[in-house]
């Protein structure tokens, strides 16, 4: 039983329209699901991924309009890393989004200060790319490489990560996908979870193994939630000992559970238990741009 790399990374934005313009526009990811936070249906939950909305390529955002800019601190993920095809790709992206290239990686920030990284992909794993006509195919983002977190006492997490099958380093390596989880010394300033910060990182599991993973978390000293049905996948949540919020999410059913593949992300999708509130929810939420339609106009 193995975790199949990173499933998704969920972050916070205070500006959903600007968020769409950057991730679907500048980065060329596909907005595969426009829905609401299932714990707070008055705010957006936006999902960007490859063309098929695959586990392993999905960065998501809760929108809290007007949220101040946050900062990563001890016990928080501070960098999200994606793969690209080559060192030439790093130059393409440096010209497009700025940042600094060092050691076969480009580090830059999104408009709200979230630190992002593009690394040259030597994994040998199938690339997870989205169709973006203004981004050459060979330079398109290829899915997650992993995440880095701040931790003052990273050794506290050794037992849990080992119980979850992370290889020393730490890396979750499945049959077809992998993802790293690394620690860095924290800054002196205390973290503030707000716009431009990571809310949690999710690791991918096969659906039939989900209950067994919950038992593994307990075996490793963690305190997981019961299995929660998020409609597009099922999840358990727990904090690893440094403080980072982890999720283990199933691969599937996926984003075509409630809308056709061809029009993913183009209209507001609501879980069945919220459908009765559609009129109220649509009046609250801010209209969003459609970068794909703008490109083809």
Image (cartoon, grey):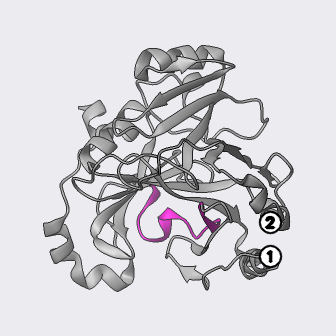
| Res. 281 image quadrant | bottom left
Q: Using the rendered image of the protein, determine whether residue 62 is visible from the camera's viewpoint.
A: yes
Q: Residue at x 30, y 38 (%)?
A: 21
283 or 214: nearer the eye?
214
Q: Is residue 84 visible?
A: no
The span shown in magenta is 244-261
The quarter in which the N terminus is drawn is bottom right
145 w.r.t. 240: above or below: above
Residue 206 in which image quadrant: bottom right
| Residue named by callout 2 | 164
Q: Is residue 68 above or below residue 159?
A: above
Q: Quadrant of residue 4?
A: bottom right
In what quadrant of the picture does the C terminus appear?
top left
Rounded to the nearest whole Å, what is the CA distance between mark 1 and mark 2?
6 Å
Q: In the structure shown, which secondary structural element does the residue marked by tag 1 occupy?
A: helix
Using a 10 Å C-alpha cutoff, classify the residue at mark 1 as few (fewer than 14 neighbours), some (14 to 19) or many (20 or more). some
x, y percent for residue 11: 45, 53
Residue receiving disc 1: 216
Residue at 44% in and 40% down: 114
Residue at x 57%, y 19% (from the top left corner): 90
Circles 1 and 2: CB atoms closer than 8 Å: yes
């Amino acid at each position: 039983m193995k975790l199949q790399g990173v499933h998704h990374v969920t972050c916070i934005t205070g500006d959903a329209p600007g968020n769409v313009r950057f991730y679907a526009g500048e980065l060329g990811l596909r907005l595969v699901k426009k829905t609401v936070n299932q714990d707070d249906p008055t705010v957006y939950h936006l999902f960007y991924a490859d063309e098929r909305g695959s586990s392993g390529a999905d960065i998501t955002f809760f929108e809290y309009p007007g949220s101040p800019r946050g900062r990563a601190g001890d016990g928080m993920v501070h960098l999200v890393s994606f793969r690209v095809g080559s060192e030439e790709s790093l130059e393409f992206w440096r010209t497009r989004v700025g940042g600094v290239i060092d050691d076969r990686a480009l580090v830059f920030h999104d408009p709200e200060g979230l630190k992002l990284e593009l690394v040259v992909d030597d994994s040998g794993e199938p690339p997870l790319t989205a169709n973006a006509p203004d981004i050459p195919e060979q330079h398109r983002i290829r899915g997650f490489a992993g995440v880095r977190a701040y931790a003052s006492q990273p050794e506290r997490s050794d037992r849990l990560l080992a119980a979850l099958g992370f290889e020393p380093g730490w890396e979750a390596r499945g049959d077809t996908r992998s993802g790293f989880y690394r620690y860095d010394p924290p800054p002196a300033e205390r973290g503030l979870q707000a716009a431009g910060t990571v809310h949690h990182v999710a690791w991918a599991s096969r659906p039939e193994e989900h209950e067994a993973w919950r038992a593994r978390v307990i075996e490793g000293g963690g305190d997981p939630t019961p299995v929660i049905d998020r409609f597009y996948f099922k999840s358990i949540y727990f904090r690893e000992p440094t403080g980072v919020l982890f999720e283990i999410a199933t691969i599937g059913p996926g984003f075509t559970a409630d809308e056709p593949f061809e029009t993913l992300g183009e209209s507001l999708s609501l879980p069945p238990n919220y459908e009765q509130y559609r009129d109220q929810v649509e009046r609250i939420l801010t209209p969003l741009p459609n970068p794909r339609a703008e490109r083809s106009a």
